[in-house]
Amino acid sequence: MEETDIQVSFVGMDPTEALKKYALEKIMKKEELFTDATSIEVSFKEFVHSKGVAQDFRIDINVKLPNTVVRVEERGSDMYANIDKGTDILFRRLKRYGDKKEYWEGKASWKIIEAQEALKALEEEAGTELEDYSDYVPKIAKRKIVEDMSPIEEGEAIERMELLGYDQYLFRNKSNNKICMLYRRKQGGYGLVEPKEGI
């Protein structure tokens, strides 16, 4: 992947050559991590409605790989600091992808460790009393339509969730063909929600 192949866009702000150059230099410092990338998109965004607030600038970096996407989003009041933090996270995620390349290519089976202690903790949490949310009205901030729900293994779902930087991930489980929700637990580890038999 060459520097000229990286697509850079500016949303809600004037394009600046200095920002673009700085981001491209940071990304190309670790160009060996991008050998499998099919496309790289960098988007600089300024949110006018939050000007002067700590979260008014954002950088989005999307790297398409043959079997998945690595996504980074970093917010803050200083775009150069966002670039630094965002590229550091990107490099860690790309290294993680590279470390598990044989799994992504289908040369090895995805594996996960069932943590019995974590499952017990989940059961204990289920027995706790819930707060009263009778006045709360939830609002959907974003809706995403998923086009490809090809069955994948649980281990691959964990990796996809980590590479995308999500806290939860919806997927079709290859072992039982059910739609499942994987999520990151606050206490550490992962949880998996799946429908019972017959649903």
Image (cartoon, helix red, strand yellow):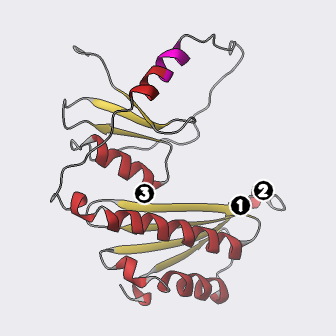
Q: Earlier in the sequence, mark 2 or mark 3?
A: 2
Marks 2 and 3 in Cβ contact (< 8 Å): no
**Residue topped by disc 1:** 47
Marks 1 and 2 in Cβ contact (< 8 Å): yes
Residue 127: x percent and y percent? Answer: 55, 10
Residue 48: x percent and y percent? Answer: 75, 61
Q: Earlier in the sequence, mark 3 or mark 1?
A: 1
Q: CA distance from mark 2 to mark 3?
A: 28 Å
Q: Is residue 112 above or below residue 53?
A: above
Which corner quadrant of the image does residue 25 belong to? bottom right
**Residue topped by disc 3:** 163
The residue under the point 50% across, 22% down is 121
Residue 100: x percent and y percent? Answer: 30, 61
Per the rendered image, the range of residues in magenta is 121-126
**Residue topped by disc 2:** 50
Q: CA distance from mark 3 to mark 1?
A: 25 Å
The residue under the point 67% across, 61% down is 75
Q: From the viewer's side, name the closer residue of 144 and 177.
A: 177
The C terminus: image quadrant:
top left
- Secondary structure beneath label 2: helix
The residue under the point 26% across, 45% down is 111
